[in-house]
Image (spheres, rainbow, N blue to C red):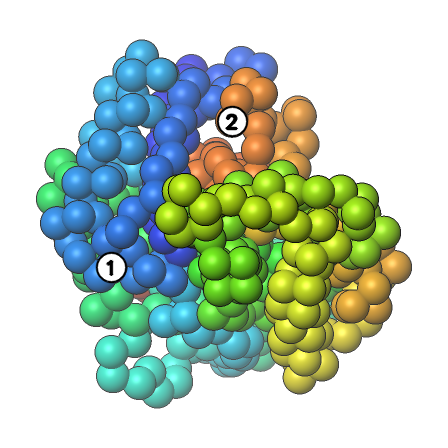
Amino acid sequence: MGKSEITTGLDMGSGRITCIIAEHDEEIGKIRVLGGAVAACKGLKGGMVLNIEETARCVRSVVEAAERKAKTTVTEVYMGVRGAHMQAFDAKGKYSVPRTDQEITGEDVASVIENAKAFHIAQGLEILHVIPQKFSLDRLSGISNPIGMHGALLEVGVHIVLASTPALTNLLKAVSEAGLRVADGPVYTLLAVGELVVTERDKDLSCLLLDAGGQTTSMAVYADGCMHFSKELPVGGDNITRDLVCGLGISMAEARMIKEKYGAALTDMTDADQLITVTGLSTQTKKEIRQRELLHYIQPRVEEIYEMIFGTMQKCAYTSLSGGAILVGGASLLKGMPEAAKQLLELEQVRLGSPAPDILECPEEYATQTYLGAAALACYPCLKNWQTDLHSYSGRGSALKDIWRWAKDLF
């Protein structure tokens, strides 16, 4: 990487597309956001393409708007994906060192990680990421770098992320038809966000990362310094908005505005008797309601979302999270969401996630949850820990060759 390099993050969200163009300045070790743009996309739903032509048009429009603000042009992007079509789980690999000297090399590391991928993949799915966790050598666990050590049996734990092949193909085709190239294959947006907002201390303490979007909520558990669990839930902020639409008889745009301006997840965060004027589906129809009425629609849905998250946490092996939770995403901005998460998820602490200022230099316009996913994707190739992701998307060719290159570079 030279003195500076332009990178572009393209977050293909639940129902909108966000773009951030950034510059990595190696002299000061910071990444600067140069420009960005966001737009709703009718061609996307739940992170999947419904209409390639409409999605391509929206991609082109958003990227061009970001280019104008950044005063530059881009030809490739780091494309972030999410949605219910994705699956993830932990796996283990073993490798018997064949040489008599038994000194662990980068090739041995590549081989044991490749062995961790020796499982049946259902038709229509493919490996998107293989993320190494910890190694063990002759049953001695907790090793972060085994190269140079001696032993006969090398083992590794990995976190594997799968995605639907048709879903990825449609996303890639839409971006290609917009005249752009996807750099290094698709990236799981939650992984990039975690690298940007989850600190090493958070990872060591064990914490929950929640990315609450419009139509999906992504969740990941970090423990012992790395990601150990991730899952996509088919719920988000749009569910709350639609409840207001049905309950109050108003449009989606009106419901979204009311929710963002007056809504809250907790009763004590509202002026219950404040009167609010709402416009019905007929623009001629207006009525006044009290703010407490909004809570009748918002609170049950917030509780349902957090109950779904809590139930998922109980099913995984990581239920003790001394680091609490980190909330990101547009839906996390509803007043009282961190406080509600603390209560309903039974956690000691919950905070809104934000990039460390020594990593990202960002104008106020883009320093919001709306742009965080795209900003994380723009930072992804420059972040300190990004090498720990063995990106295994099939479009990159030989996975074993890629793993060997990673091991050699990292160690």
Residue at the location (81% across, 56% down)? 267
Residue 274 vs 365, above or below: the answer is below
Q: Position of residue 171 (x, y in %)?
A: 24, 55
Q: Secondary structure at mark 2?
A: helix
Quarter of image, res 298: bottom right
* Horizontal and vertical percent position of residue 163: 35, 69
Instruction: Say the numbered circle drawn on residue 49.
Output: 1
Other residues around mark 2 within 10 Å, as few (<14) / some (14–19) / many (≥20): some
Q: Is residue 47 above or below residue 85?
A: above
Across and down, in percent, residue 294 comes to 66, 56
**How far is the residue under mark 2 from the one under mark 1?**
26 Å
Q: Label 1 crowding class (10 Å Cα cut-off): few <14, some 14-19, many 20+? A: many
* Count of number-bearing discs: 2
Q: Residue at x 77, y 75 (%)?
A: 319
What's the amino acid at mark 1?
Val
Residue 138 in view here: no
Of 378 and 100, nearer the camera is 378
Task: Locate the N terminus and report the quarter of the image it occupies.
Answer: top left
**Residue topped by disc 2:** 366
The amino acid pointed to by label 2 is Tyr
Residue 119 x/y as whole percent: 39, 85
Q: Is residue 79 left or right of residue 244?
A: left
Q: Quadrant of residue 72?
A: top left
Compared to residue 79, the image places residue 360 above or below, namely above
* 95 left or right, relative to 206: left
Horizontally, residue 372 falls left or right of residue 135, namely left
Circle 1 SS class:
strand
**Left or right relative to 347: residue 71:** left
